[in-house]
Every structure is written in structure tokens, then in C-alpha cells.
Image (tube, grey):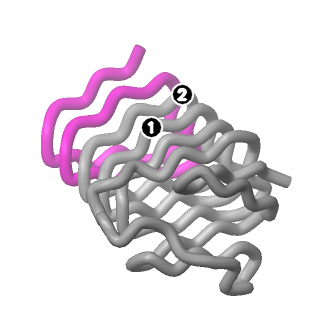
Amino acid sequence: MASINIDGITYSGNNVSISGNNIKIDGINVGECSTNPKNVIKIVGNIEGNLKTDRSVTCDNVGGDVDALGSVDCDHVEGDVDAGGSVNCSDVGKNIDAGGSVRCYNVGGDIDAGGSVTCR
């Protein structure tokens, strides 16, 4: 279970969804975050499920997929990463689809990037 800190408030859960200013944890609406969509969502801890947001996100390990309209900066992701911006990850178990550049280690699937690709 992840400890998710958004706008100074800590939540716990496995699947995280942030759309507009609504925060849902495991399908339950738990609160609101800043109405500024430019805020980067920072998640502390491992997420066992999926992460979906209409913003940029930084996080630790994700057991499922990451879907963000902004950029994604995270550690290991078991599933796919779909980002409207750039992606900076450790290992990704499946595919990466990024509107910007991609920096990663090992990728289990394909990489589709609108910018450069660097595998370290």
C-alpha cells in the first residue's frame, strides 16, 4: 500500500486516480488537490495497482500501469507507461508511449517516443 502525499495531505491505497482536482484511491473519492493542473503529483511508497493522472507525476515502484497526461518520473513499473510528456524510469515491464523523450533502463516491450530515447 502506498503513502500518497498530495498538497500536504497523506492518503493510503493501491490504485490512484487524479482527474481535475478529484483524488480517488481504490475507486473511492477521498478528497481534492490544488486546482492548479501544473502541480506535479508526488507519490511516496510503492503502488501495487495502477496510477492515472491528468498531471505530471513522480513516484516509486508501480505494480500496474502508469497513465499520465504530463511527464512521468518513477522507479520500476511492472506494466505500461503512457505519458503525454517525457518518461524517466528505471525498468518498465511492458511498453512505453511518450509524447516527449524517454530515459530508462530495461523495457520489456516497445518504446514509442515523440523525442529522443536513451536506454542506460
Q: Position of residue 82 (x, y in %)?
A: 40, 59
> Is 108 included in the stretch rendered in magenta?
yes
Q: Residues within 10 Å of mark 1 (few under 14, many from 20)?
A: some
Segment colored magenta: 92-120
Q: Residues within 10 Å of mark 2 (few under 14, many from 20)?
A: some
What is the residue that sits farthest to the right in this orientation?
A: 1
| Residues at marks 1 and 2, CA–CA distance in whole angstroms | 9 Å
Tag 2 residue: 90
Residue visible at 68% across and 53% down in the picture? 4
Q: Secondary structure at mark 1?
A: strand
Q: How many marks?
A: 2
Q: Which amino acid type is shown beneath numbered disc 1? A: Asp
Q: Which amino acid type is shown beneath numbered disc 2? A: Ser
Please give left or right for residue 108 compared with residue 38 in the image: right
Depicted 16 relative to depicted 48: above or below: below
Foreground pick, 22 / 52: 22
Query: Which dot, 1 or 2, sits closer to the camera?
Result: 1
Residue visible at 32% across and 64% down in the picture? 69
Foreground pick, 53 / 104: 53
Asked whether the beta carbons under mark 1 and mark 2 sit within 8 Å of each other, the answer is no
Please give left or right for residue 69 compared with residue 89 in the image: left
Q: Secondary structure at mark 2?
A: loop
Q: Quadrant of the N terminus?
A: bottom right
Residue visible at 41% across and 14% down in the picture? 120
Please give left or right for residue 37 compared with residue 41 in the image: left
> Is 84 included in the stretch rendered in magenta?
no
Tag 1 residue: 73
Which quadrant would residue 86 be assigned to in this image?
top left
